[in-house]
Image (cartoon, rainbow, N blue to C red):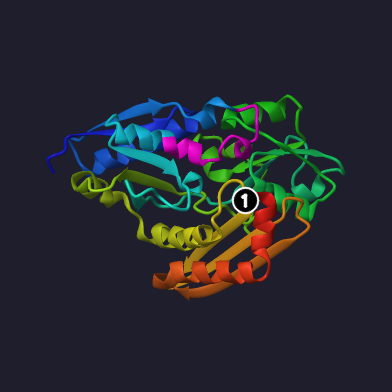
């Protein structure tokens, strides 16, 4: 391979830097002698933290700045949390690599309570995710669910200062930052169906950049790729974004893929669920089928109300 220097576009948050460095180290292991450089970039999503993410443009803000950096020639690839990547990748880019998945579940964190079921009526719960919010409201309509933005450390700090009785974060982020001990309880998919791609990292590159794509392909994990492809098919058909309380989660058992999907009104009063099984090669088709089933049962109306 003629490339000996690769630049990774990354956000500057501690978690994003960890993720980029993780990819850098994996690339160095596969390609001894390769020099990998991290290029920190600021995104509007990171700069604006006093308003809900959906009010300022959604998670696509995190991705767009890194894509612009690649188009401008400041970086060769970008590392993303797959749950942040929009359903449709622009034609100027490709997303050929999805790494092996970390814990995909949500994590309940509290200094006083062991589980959502133990929270007192009216307890304050912080989250930045509409998906988590609607599922919490379905289980516990008596709770006060409030927006919680910022990096992981900021969110934990607000819990410790007493702003919230509990918060809900992605378990993978806490584990990657060496904070697994902060997790009070892992919320299984039956309690909180994960976001599309949650726990998985993706590597994006410019379309037509064959040398770079060949260099990074070694990190692709086929099992995770197939699972996330099925989940993203649901998202694509439903035109999902962080504005939408949408969840999709796939599991593999040998050659069989089990996919669950959910769309909910923000108040948790109307929740539509669908699930199905198919050979792993038919995962995207299964995702499309489940999305059509949800639409037939009124998902379009719910999504229209949220947008």
Of 95 and 252, which appears nearest the observer? Answer: 95
The location of residue 72, given as percent across then percent down, is 30, 31
Q: Is residue 119 left or right of residue 248?
A: right
Task: Return the residue found at the far bottom.
Answer: 278
The location of residue 278, given as percent across then percent down, is 48, 75
Q: Is residue 18 left or right of residue 272?
A: left
Q: Is residue 147 visible?
A: yes
- Examine the structure image and report whether residue 29 is included in the region drawn in magenta: no
- Examine the structure image and report whether residue 50 is included in the region drawn in magenta: yes
Residue at horizontal 76%, vertical 48%? Answer: 116
The location of residue 272, given as percent across then percent down, is 68, 64
Of 197 and 177, which appears nearest the observer? Answer: 197
Q: Is residue 52 above or below residue 157?
A: below
Residue at horizontal 43%, vertical 42%? Answer: 80
Residue at horizontal 22%, vertical 44%? Answer: 212
Q: Which residues are magenta?
A: 49-64
């Amino acid at each position: 391979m003629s490339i000996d220097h690769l630049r990774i576009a990354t956000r500057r948050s501690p978690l994003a830097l960890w993720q980029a460095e993780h990819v850098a180290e994996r690339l160095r292991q596969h390609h001894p002698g390769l020099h990998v450089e991290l290029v920190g970039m600021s995104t509007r999503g990171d700069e604006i933290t006093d308003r809900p993410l959906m009010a300022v443009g959604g998670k696509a803000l995190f991705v767009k700045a890194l894509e612009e950096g690649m188009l401008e020639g400041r970086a060769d690839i970008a590392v993303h949390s797959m749950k942040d990547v929009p359903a449709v990748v622009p034609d100027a880019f490709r997303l050929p690599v999805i790494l092996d998945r970390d814990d995909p579940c949500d994590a309940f964190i509290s200094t006083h309570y062991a589980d959502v079921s133990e929270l007192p009526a009216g307890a304050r719960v912080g989250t930045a995710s509409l998906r988590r919010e609607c599922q919490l409201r379905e289980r516990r309509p008596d709770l006060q669910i409030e927006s919680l933005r910022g990096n992981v450390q900021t969110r934990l700090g607000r819990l410790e200062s007493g702003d919230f009785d509990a918060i809900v974060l992605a378990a993978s982020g806490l584990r990657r930052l060496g904070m697994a001990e902060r997790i009070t309880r892992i919320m299984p998919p039956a309690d909180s169906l994960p976001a599309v791609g949650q726990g998985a990292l993706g590597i994006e590159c410019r379309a037509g950049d064959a040398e770079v794509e060949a260099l990074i392909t070694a990190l692709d994990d086929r099992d995770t790729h197939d699972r996330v492809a099925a989940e993203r098919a649901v998202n694509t058909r439903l035109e999902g974004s962080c504005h939408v309380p949408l969840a999709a989660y796939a599991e593999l058992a040998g050659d069989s893929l089990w996919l669950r999907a959910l769309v909910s009104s923000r108040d948790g009063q109307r929740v539509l669920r669908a699930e199905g099984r198919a050979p792993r090669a038919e995962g995207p088709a299964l995702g499309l089928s489940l999305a059509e089933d949800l639409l037939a049962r009124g998902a379009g109306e719910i999504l229209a109300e949220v947008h």
